[in-house]
Amino acid sequence: MKGSRERLHEIIFEADTPAGKRFDVLLLWLIVASVVTVMAETVPDWHDRYRGTFVALEWVFTGLFTIEYITRLLVVKLPLRYATSFFGLVDLLAILPTFVGLLIPGSGSLRVIRILRLLRAFRVLKLVGFIEEARGLQTALRASRRRIIVFLSVVLALVTILGTLMYLVEHGQSGFSSIPKSIYWAIVTVTTVGYGDIAPQTIAGQVIASCMMIIGYAIIAVPTGMIGIEMIRKGASSGSVSTQACPACGRDGHDPDAVYCKHCGNPL
């Protein structure tokens, strides 16, 4: 017979049992309802007319999510491991904005971050393929992070030099009133955003701007290629993953034949 702790863990963390699936589906509907409530509260007419209702609903949602978060910490053997995991941090951020809003007015809109909890739907709906793809993307990002850091450093140096050069060419006119503002223009131009709030007026400035626009297309393509290569390289060696959650740290994503948790070493 399973103890109450093991039974709660099975219901809260597992989606393989009917009770666990019902719990997760109910949780997803609560998350959707809470996010819709936060969005609706920002509509001026509704905020003034149903202010009391919005406040009551928010505290109901926050209370339920707080109880759920505390229960998750109680049923795992290593609560600190779960609290510092991705979903553990997301669960904590889902309840913090309401309490922070009592101290810092206006910060309550951050409650919309709860929508990140909908990522649990991948596990609930058995979308294992999505979990595999997410893990592959994460692996590719980690493998190419050093090259991306070097690339971003080069881009930062480039926009600093070109922004300073533009400041000198435009003689501090046409919106290029300082080097930081000129660097801002260089970043906007290189990334091909082009707000148009600042534009060069001199011939030399326009030539520099044209070169930066052309460079911008290459800058966008380089990191995409880096990550793409790593995804292709890792794709051949990637295997399927399981939705089973570790009873100690609560983290999932294990191999189907795994006996021990790859995060904390606890038997599965």
Image: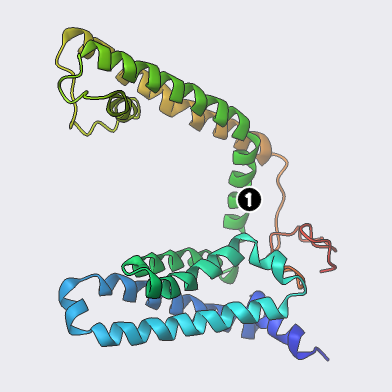
Quadrant, the C terminus: bottom right
In the displayed structure image, the side of residue 131 where residue 5 appears, left or right: right
Q: Amino acid at mark 1?
A: Arg
- The percent position of residue 41, horizontal first and vertical second, equals 26, 74
Q: Quadrant of residue 114?
A: bottom left
Residue underneath mark 1: 135
Residue at image coords 42%, 86%: 60
Q: Depth check: 188 or 245 in front?
A: 188
- The percent position of residue 202, horizontal first and vertical second, equals 16, 11
Q: Quick check: 241 above or below 230?
A: below
Q: Quadrant of residue 172?
A: top left
Residue at image coords 30%, 23%: 179
Q: Depth check: 245 or 5 in front?
A: 5
Q: Secondary structure at mark 1?
A: helix
Q: Quick check: 54 above or below 93?
A: below
Asked if one can make out residue 87 in the rendered structure from this viewpoint, the answer is: yes
